[in-house]
Image: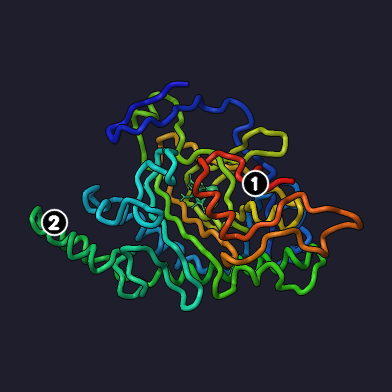
Amino acid sequence: MVVLANPALVEIPLVRPQKHGAFFSAIPVVDLSKPFSAEALVKACEDVGFVKVINHNVPMDVVQRLEAEAVKFFEMPQVFKETSGPADPFGYGNKRIGPNGDVGQVEYLLFGITSKPLSYTSMSFLEEPSSCLFGLSLFDLIRTRRLVAKHCFLLWLFICGPYRSPALSEYLLAVKKLASDVLELIAEGLKIEPRDVLNGLVTDEQSDGLFRLNHYPRCPLLERLDRSWTGFGEHTDPQIISVLRSNNTTGLQISLKNGSWVSVPPDQESFFIVVGDCLQVLTNGRFKSVRHRVLANGSKSRVSMIYFFGPPPAEKIAPLSQLMGEGEQSKYKEFTWGEYKKAAYKSRLGDNRLGQFEK
Ligand SMILES: C=C1C[C@]23C[C@@]1(O)CC[C@H]2[C@@]12CC[C@H](O)[C@@](C)(C(=O)O1)[C@H]2[C@@H]3C(=O)O
Ligand SMILES: O=C(O)CCC(=O)C(=O)O
Ligand SMILES: [Fe+2]
C-alpha cells in the first residue's frame, strides 16, 4: 500500500482502483409511496443493511439550499473554517476522524442534535439556528471578524453575506420525519406492535441525534496517479439508522455479506438508509449493521450529509421480545445507548464495536 504524506502531516492510505464489480447494480430501492414498501424495507435491511428510498417527501429545494451552504462553507479559507474547530466531538474537523487517531481525506462539520426544541448544539455553536451563521456562534464570528478584518474587507463581506438561512433546521425536521416513517414501516414489515416501538426511539425528546456534513475535496494529483484514497475508512454506524444523502459524486461503498466491497451509484435525489449497530441488536442480528466507507478518486468533490439517529442515552438496547422465536436467546449482553456510545468513542473507526457486547 502506498501512503502519501500530506501538508497537514497526516498520512492517508492510497488504494488501487477497483477493476471488478464497479457498481452494485442491485442496491435495494424502495418506493415509499407504494404498497408493500414495509416488507421491501425489511428484506433490504436483512439482505444488505442498506437501502435507497425514493418518494421520501423531503423537499428537494431544502436539500439543495443546504448543499449550497455547505459548499460555500467548505470553500472558505482554511483559517476561517478552523475557528469552528477542532471537532471535539462537535465542530469543524479536517482529516482527523474521532479521538483515536483515524484519518481520511475529508473535512467536516459535526453537530449534536437535540429533539425538543429542535436545535443543533456544540460547545461553540449557538443553540438557536436562526441566530447562527451556518453553525458559527457569535463568539466565533467576533473572533473571525477581527481576524478577517485584519486581512481583507471583501472576504469579510463574503463571509457575512450568504449564511443566514434556516436550511439546516428545515432539513433536520424533514429528514427526521423520513427516519420516523421508515422505522414505522420497518415495524409494520416485522409485524411488531405497537407500531411506534422503533420510531419512538428516535422521536423521543431525549433521543440522541448527530448530523454531519462531509466534504471530500477534488485532488487532481490523485486523479493523475489513477489511485483512490481513503476519504472515510470502513466502519459501521453505532446508532439505530443513519440517513445519508450526497451530491452526484461516487465514492461510497458498502460491504456485502460475502465480504466484497461494492460501489453505490450516487443519486442526489434519493436518500440512503444505513442500518446501525443498535438496530442489529434490536432485531437480535436479523438485520446487520452494514460496513461502509468512502474512497475518493480525486476527480470531483463529494459533499454528503448524514443524520444519525440514536435513542435516548438511558434506553436499554436489547432484542425486541416479539422478534424472538420460542427459546431464542439474546445474542448480546444488555447495555444502554449511553454505555454503548461511551465504548464507541474509545474505539477506532474500523473496530467491531459490537464484538465486546456479544455473548
Ligand atoms: C473513530 C471514531 C469516529 C466516531 C467515533 C469513533 O471513536 C468511533 C465511531 C465513529 C462514528 C462513525 C459514524 C459517525 O460518523 C460518527 C459521528 C459516529 O457516531 O460514530 C463517528 C464518530 C465521530 O466521527 O466522532
Ligand atoms: O460521507 C459519506 O458518504 C459517508 C460518511 C459516513 O459513513 C459517516 O460519516 O459515518
Ligand atoms: Fe457511516
Q: Image check: 325 left or right of 163?
A: right
Q: Is residue 131 above or below residue 288?
A: below
Ligand 1 within 8 Å of the CB at mark 1:
no
Q: Position of residue 78 (x, y in %)?
A: 24, 47
Mark 1 surroundings: few (<14), some (14-19) or many (≥20) residues within 10 A:
some
Q: Is residue 270 visible?
A: no
- Residue 147 is labelled as 2
Q: Position of residue 299 (x, y in %)?
A: 40, 36
Q: Amino acid at mark 2?
A: Leu
Q: Quadrant of residue 142?
A: bottom left
Q: Residue furthest top?
A: 1
- Residue 7 is labelled as none
Judging by the rendered image, the residue that carries numbered circle 1 is: 354
| Mark 1 secondary-structure assignment | helix
Q: Quadrant of residue 235?
A: top right
Q: Image check: 326 left or right of 71?
A: right
Q: Amino acid at mark 1?
A: Leu
The residue lying at 46 percent from left, 78 percent from top is 117
Foreground of the two, 82 or 177: 82
- Select label 2 or label 1 by which is in front: 1
Cα distance in 3D space between marks 2 and 1? 45 Å
Q: Is residue 348 visible?
A: yes
Foreground of the two, 305 or 265: 305
Q: Quadrant of residue 145?
A: bottom left
The residue lying at 63 percent from left, 66 percent from top is 315
Q: Position of residue 302 (x, y in %)?
A: 43, 46
Q: Image check: 146 left or right of 163?
A: left
Tally of numbered discs = 2
The residue lying at 46 percent from left, 52 percent from top is 304
Q: Position of residue 242 (x, y in %)?
A: 57, 57
